[in-house]
Every structure is written in C-alpha cells, then in structure tokens.
Image: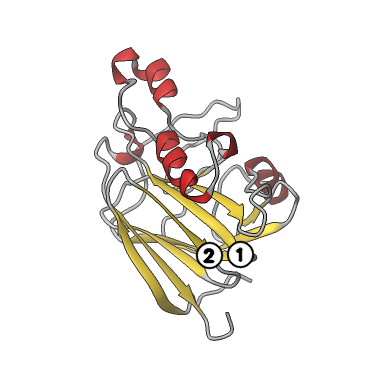
C-alpha cells in the first residue's frame, strides 16, 4: 500500500525556473517534488545508482500499470523489469510519461525555426548528466510530473494547461538507490508551464527505518 508518512526532512532545495538538478536517492527515501507556484511541468529521468545501464522505462511502466498516466500508487519500472520507485503521495492527480521532453530541435519543428535558440529540457538533461559521467546517448524516456497530456482513443494527444495549484506535490519513494535527474522545464511555447516557467522545490525525506 502507498505510504502516507514520508518521514522527516533530510534535504531541501529550491530549483530555479528553467534549471536542472540531480541527486542520489537512497532506497527507502522519498523525494517530494513541490510545484511552488503552480502550473509548472517537471521533467525527470531515473537511473539505478549502482548501474546506470538500468534506467526508467515508460513503456514497461505503462504496460505493467495498464494505465496511460502516472498517479498515486504507480510503480516506476526499469528497462530490466524491476520496480525502481513508487508514487506514494499525490495532491495533483495528473502526470504524464508519453509526451517526452522538449528539445531545441522539436521546438524548431513545432513552433518555428525562430525558437530553436531557446533552452530546452534535453539541454538541461545533457548538462546535468555530464556531472555523472553520462551523455545525451543516455537520455531515455522521461517522466513529466504535473504535466497534463490527455490521450484520445485514437492515440492522439495534446499538451494542455498545467493542472497543478501552488503547493501541490508528488512523493516518489525509492525501491533501490537511484540517480534522480530533473529538468525544471523551460518550455514557453506550449501551455505546460502557463508560458511562464517558475521555481519548484525538492525535498528528501526518510523514516527511521530507511
């Protein structure tokens, strides 16, 4: 059953708008991601800390859950079929893992060549992964916390206004030691951030037994 007690605070940090962040999350610790001002998308990559060749798989996660969305109780599955983490609290109720992350190239295709220079999540990921000896080749499917991407019966999907309110949070509890990488999405061309990226807060909590 999902835990309702994330434990006591051992780390907290405010990630500025548009910036990346990463940290190792120990087994049993809970990462709380707080949408400080609301309507902010948070892109994330997850790797096994002991062997980064094992990483989050959106395809396996959706297949195991039988759901197109991430929500309370969702098990986050690796490319080796193991449970990496669980969503143990959620005050927003809608998170995506199908739409991928923005890049300079996708911005140019979707919004015009004049937007190519804009900073994007893929560039944030490349910068942050380099601190851990990883490269752009290690970027795989990602999670999009607080991002509203309804999927139609035809399989088409559209990015809509962010559904989260100021202070909404999601808790992710690690089932193994994890490298957790975040891009506080800088996207200004679609409504996932209300066209105005804002800061978020991350907190790591643990119980006495963790």
Q: Position of residue 27 (x, y in %)?
A: 60, 70
Q: Is residue 100 left or right of residue 32?
A: right
Residue 189: x, y in percent?
31, 27
**Circle 1 residue:** 177
The residue positioned farthest toward the bottom in the image shown: 208
Mark 2–mark 1 distance (CA, rounded to whole Å): 6 Å
* Left or right of residue 174, residue 23 in this image: left
Residue 162: image quadrant is top left
The local secondary structure at tag 1 comes to loop
Q: Is 186 situated above or below 133?
A: above
The answer to whether the residues at label 2 and label 1 have Cβ atoms under 8 Å apart is: yes
Q: Residue at x 48, y 51 (%)?
A: 181
Residue 15 horizontal side relative to residue 151, left or right: left
Is residue 148 at all visible to an observer of this figure?
no
The residue positioned 43% from the left and 28% from the top of the image is: 103
Image: 178 above or below 121? below
* In the image, farthest residue toward the top: 113
The residue at which mark 2 appears reads as 25
Q: Residue 73: x, y in percent?
A: 59, 61
Residue at x-position 60% and y-position 27%: 155
**Quadrant including the C terminus:** bottom right
- Relative image position of residue 81 (x, y in whole percent): 75, 51
């Amino acid at each position: 059953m999902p835990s309702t007690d994330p434990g006591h605070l051992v780390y907290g940090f405010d990630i500025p708008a548009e910036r990346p962040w990463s940290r190792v999350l120990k087994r049993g610790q809970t990462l709380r991601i707080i949408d400080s001002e609301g309507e902010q998308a948070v892109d994330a990559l997850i790797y096994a800390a002991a062997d980064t060749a094992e990483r989050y798989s959106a395809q396996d996660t959706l297949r195991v859950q039988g759901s197109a969305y991430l929500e309370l109780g969702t098990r986050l599955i690796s490319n080796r079929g193991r449970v990496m983490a669980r969503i143990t609290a959620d005050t927003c109720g809608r998170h995506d893992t199908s739409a991928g992350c923005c890049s300079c190239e996708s911005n140019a295709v979707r919004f015009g060549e004049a937007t190519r220079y804009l900073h994007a999540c893929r560039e944030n990921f490349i910068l942050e992964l380099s601190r851990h000896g990883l490269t752009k080749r290690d970027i795989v499917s990602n999670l999009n916390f607080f991002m509203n991407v309804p999927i139609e019966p035809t399989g088409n999907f559209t990015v809509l206004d962010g559904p989260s309110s100021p202070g909404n949070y999601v808790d992710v509890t690690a089932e193994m030691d994890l490298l957790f990488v975040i891009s506080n999405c800088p996207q200004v061309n679609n409504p996932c951030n209300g066209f105005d990226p804002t800061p978020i807060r991350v907190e790591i909590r643990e119980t006495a037994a963790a």
